[in-house]
Image (spheres, rainbow, N blue to C red):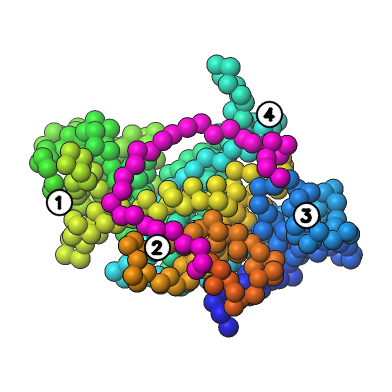
């Protein structure tokens, strides 16, 4: 059987397995989907999974192949409300685990962590996600998607969705790293400077994994503040001594040892007690960190904190690993603009969460098929890659059984793009506003 056929079979089995567990899947297990109707529970999963950015009525016509007995929008909305959003989350993880091939880099799995804002329909009643208008700007509601992305397999492995007022990337990052406590393969967690934190590093070390985190260059707001570090590139190993208690003994230690760091009671560090009995010795937590300064361009340097061993990972490999982190940034772009995370077919929170988990699953499904499609690059000026936008369109129709497994690979391979190496373009930032259904292309 072709790889695409096996992958679709894995997904369909996951959907069937979840639908056969009413307690986990349905809001009212004793009543939901017990009678025959135009929608089965599996129809709801597959319909939401294959949705694009058009109006709901168009999506239903497309799913039911423009049949004259296509169910109404109202019937669909009522049917989807019977399924828990957590069932789609379970489906995402079940498929991610079932399709994982453990693609490795030097024996490690590379997981990049980052977050991205997701604008959802405005609802002032949802105070945790609502952002009121300021200076004449429009009000809006915001969710924050925290994710771990496999940089070698090009798939999402974990996600934590938070509302605007509950947004805490550090807490979400630690929660996601704990999902890999029992992995048989060692993991390197890679993150940008927003994740610079003693607590994040300590959690990963305690979990027996590795980290590679870019840290701020400013010596006033970074873990390297107060250290006498050389100019240019360097690679040094340090051991920080973290302590909460502010005794005279600790203060004197700090004067002679710049690696002694006092952690305030308001700062999060889970491996030191907030309070200790008077007269008891201070608890010191030792945090070994390797600091590597690498040159990016003629005048640009980046500083990396890691616990990767020097004998195995040289500074050049550290530089290569950090460059690979950009994969999660481009994945968010594809997730929003190609898969359609910017467009929702609902206003209720549960229904929006259904679609977020479905979009991430469709991304993984499409990337897996694209990555297993061979490309012939001989006798060409540039190397080529799969056109991911076309691959997603083909995969949607493949899931709807309009394309046979034997033809999927042929169609995906027919749509390729040249990779012009060494080109740099300035990043253009612009505001993006919600495009309502009545203003979208039909």
**Magenta-highlighted residues:** 413-442
Residue at 25 percent of width and 40 percent of height: 223
Asked whether the beta carbons under mark 2 and mark 1 sit within 8 Å of each other, the answer is no
| Residue 92 in picture, x, y percent from top left | 59, 61
Residue at 47 percent of width and 32 percent of height: 430
Q: In screen coordinates, is 145 left or right of 317?
A: right
| Residue 11 in picture, x, y percent from top left | 63, 69
Q: The N terminus lies in which quarter of the figure?
A: bottom right
Q: Earlier in the sequence, mark 1 or mark 3?
A: 3
* Whole-number angstrom distance, CA of label 1 to CA of label 4: 51 Å
* Whole-number angstrom distance, CA of label 4 to CA of label 3: 29 Å
Residue 415 visible from this viewpoint: yes
Query: Residue 428 or 109: which is nearer the viewer?
Result: 428
Mark 4 secondary-structure assignment:
loop
Q: Viewer-nearest of labels 2 and 1?
A: 2
Residue at 46 percent of width and 62 percent of height: 416
Residue 24 vertical placement versus 261 (above, below)? below
Q: Which residue is mark 3?
A: 60
Q: Viewer-nearest of labels 2 and 3?
A: 2
Mark 3 secondary-structure assignment:
helix
Residue 279 visible from this viewpoint: no
Q: Which residue is mark 1?
A: 235
Q: Earlier in the sequence, mark 4 or mark 3?
A: 3
Q: Is residue 426 magenta?
A: yes
* Whole-number angstrom distance, CA of label 2 to CA of label 1: 36 Å
Q: In screen coordinates, is 203 left or right of 231?
A: right
Q: Which residue is mark 4?
A: 124
Q: Earlier in the sequence, mark 2 or mark 3?
A: 3
Q: Earlier in the sequence, mark 2 or mark 4?
A: 4
* Whole-number angstrom distance, CA of label 2 to CA of label 4: 47 Å
Asked whether the beta carbons under mark 2 and mark 3 sit within 8 Å of each other, the answer is no
Numbered badge on residue 384? 2
């Amino acid at each position: 059987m072709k790889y695409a056929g096996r992958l679709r079979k894995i997904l369909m089995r996951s959907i069937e397995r979840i639908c056969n567990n009413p307690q986990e899947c349905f809001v009212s297990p004793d009543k939901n989907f017990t009678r025959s109707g135009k929608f089965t529970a599996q129809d709801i999963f597959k319909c939401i999974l294959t949705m694009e950015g058009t109006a709901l009525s168009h999506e239903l016509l497309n799913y039911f192949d423009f049949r004259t007995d296509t169910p109404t929008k109202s019937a669909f909305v009522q049917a989807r409300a019977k399924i828990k959003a957590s069932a789609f989350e379970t489906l995402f993880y079940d498929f991610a685990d079932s399709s994982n091939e453990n693609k490795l880099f030097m024996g490690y799995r590379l997981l990049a962590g980052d977050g991205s804002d997701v604008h959802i329909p405005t609802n002032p009643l949802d105070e945790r996600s609502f952002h009121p208008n300021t200076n004449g700007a429009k009000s809006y509601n915001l969710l924050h998607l925290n994710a771990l992305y496999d940089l070698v397999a090009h798939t999402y492995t974990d996600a934590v969705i938070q509302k605007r007022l509950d947004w805490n990337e550090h807490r979400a990052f630690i929660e996601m790293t704990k999902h890999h406590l029992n992995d048989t393969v060692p993991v390197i967690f890679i993150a940008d400077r927003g994740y610079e934190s003693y607590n994040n590093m300590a959690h990963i070390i305690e979990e027996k994994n590795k980290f590679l985190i870019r840290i701020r260059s400013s010596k006033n707001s970074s873990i390297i503040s107060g250290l006498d570090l050389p100019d240019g590139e360097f690679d040094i190993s340090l051991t920080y001594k973290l302590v909460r208690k502010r005794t005279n003994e600790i203060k004197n230690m700090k004067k002679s040892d710049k690696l002694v760091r006092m952690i305030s009671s308001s700062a999060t560090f889970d491996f030191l007690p907030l309070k200790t009995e008077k007269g008891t010795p201070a608890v010191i937590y030792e945090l070994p960190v390797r600091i590597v300064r690498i040159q990016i361009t003629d005048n640009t340097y980046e500083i990396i904190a890691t616990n990767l061993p020097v004998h195995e990972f040289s500074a050049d490999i550290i530089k290569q690993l950090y460059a690979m982190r950009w994969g999660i940034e481009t994945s968010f772009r594809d997730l929003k603009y190609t898969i359609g995370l910017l467009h929702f077919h609902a206003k209720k929170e549960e229904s929006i969460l259904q679609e977020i988990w479905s979009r991430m699953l469709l991304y993984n499904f499409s990337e897996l098929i694209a990555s297993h499609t061979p490309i012939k690059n001989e006798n060409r000026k540039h190397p080529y890659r799969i056109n991911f936008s076309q691959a997603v369109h083909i995969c949607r129709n493949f899931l709807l059984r309009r394309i046979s497994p034997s033809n999927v690979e042929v169609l995906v391979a027919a749509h390729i793009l040249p990779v012009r190496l060494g080109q740099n373009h300035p990043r253009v930032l612009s505001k993006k506003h919600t495009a309502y259904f009545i203003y979208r292309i039909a």
